[in-house]
Amino acid sequence: MPELPEAETIVRGLRPVLVGRTIAGAGVVHADVLRESARRFTRKVRGRAILEVGRRGKNVVFRLADDRVLAVNLGMTGRLLPTAIVDPDAAGYRHPAVRFALDDGESLVFDDTRRFGTVECLSGEEWRARSDRMGPEPLGQTYDGEALWHGLRASRSPVRSWLLDQRKIAGVGNIYANEALFLAGIHPQRPARSVSLDEAGALHRGIRRVLQRAIDAGGTTLRDYRTAYGEEGGFAPRLLVYGRDGEPCTRCRTPVRRIVFGGRSAFHCPECQPRRRRRA
């Protein structure tokens, strides 16, 4: 599932070609990606200018005129393809769910093979309430290791599970949670409240480091993710533990181990990330 770096990469690709454009209309091919009727959705977005393209957590957020917000969650296989950059048909994208016609004759296509993604048009007030229920942005200037520690110490959940909760921290998914925990030397099943202040500082640095490096590489493509240009992200070869079970740890050469809990796979080095916290 696309995470913060993938959403951010898409936003950076869309922003130059969409800001200032007006949505002339919307053709809904598969209404199951909407949270309201196709007729009502189309009426709400038609004729509204795109003022800003941004991101909140894993969501691509279009701020429209008249205090409207178009929020797109990519789900597992969702893609946003502007025809000013890439021809979806020529590129082989065969599962359009919504086509937004723009005033310059181009289009923005939301293509989603499995249709787990969502497209919503909300009022500004509705979006602000939604955003308030999300956790802080991990790359935000005011979010530091101490703030992370205060959140962790209130939970008995495994620290990997805590990181995946979008109400706790916005945008971190399974790939980058595993990578950040490796960088911090923390076992993914450690209770969140067992993480010390110093460890939380290391985890905070790990989160920021891996997210920024993934953004710089254009995100991680393991299967379906593509940028706004229809290209694969370049971070997959740089993953240190995720998906590398059985391969030697890049630090100590111990084989990386895969475990499953909370319905999700986790990857760790049993030597660099011991189950119990090492005593100082």
Image (tube, grey):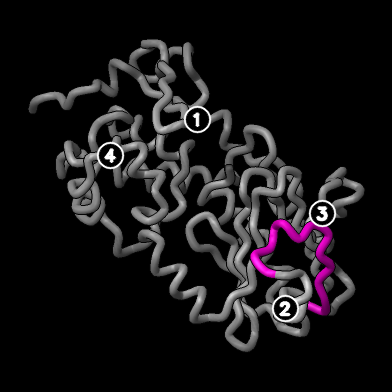
In the rendered structure, the answer to whether residue 71 lies left or right of residue 38 reads left
The quadrant of the rendering that contains the N terminus is: top right
Q: Amino acid at mark 2?
A: Val
Span highlighted in magenta in the image: 22-36
Q: Residue at x 36, y 44 (%)?
A: 163
Q: Is residue 22 visible?
A: no
Mark toward the viewer: 4 or 1: 4
In the rendered structure, the answer to whether residue 38 lies left or right of residue 163 reads right
- Around disc 2, counting alpha carbons within 10 Å, would you say few (fewer than 14), some (14 to 19), or many (20 or more)? many
- In the foreground, 233 or 159: 159
Q: Secondary structure at mark 2?
A: helix
Residue 28 magenta: yes
Mark toward the viewer: 3 or 1: 3
The x, y position of residue 111, in whole percent, is 77, 52
Circles 1 and 2, Cβ within 8 Å, touching? The answer is no
Distance CA(mark 3)–CA(mark 2) = 18 Å
Residue located beneath label 4 in the image: 157
Residue located beneath label 2 in the image: 45
Q: Amino acid at mark 3?
A: Pro
**190 in relation to 11, above or below:** above
Determine the residue located farthest toward the front in the rendered image.
37
Q: Amino acid at mark 1?
A: Leu
**Does label 2 or label 4 sit earlier along the sequence?**
2
The x, y position of residue 116, in whole percent, is 65, 48
Distance CA(mark 3)–CA(mark 4) = 38 Å
**19 in relation to 224, above or below:** below
Quarter occupied by residue 92: top right
Residue located beneath label 3 in the image: 96
**Does label 3 or label 2 sit earlier along the sequence?**
2
**Does label 4 or label 1 sit earlier along the sequence?**
4
Distance CA(mark 4)–CA(mark 1) = 25 Å
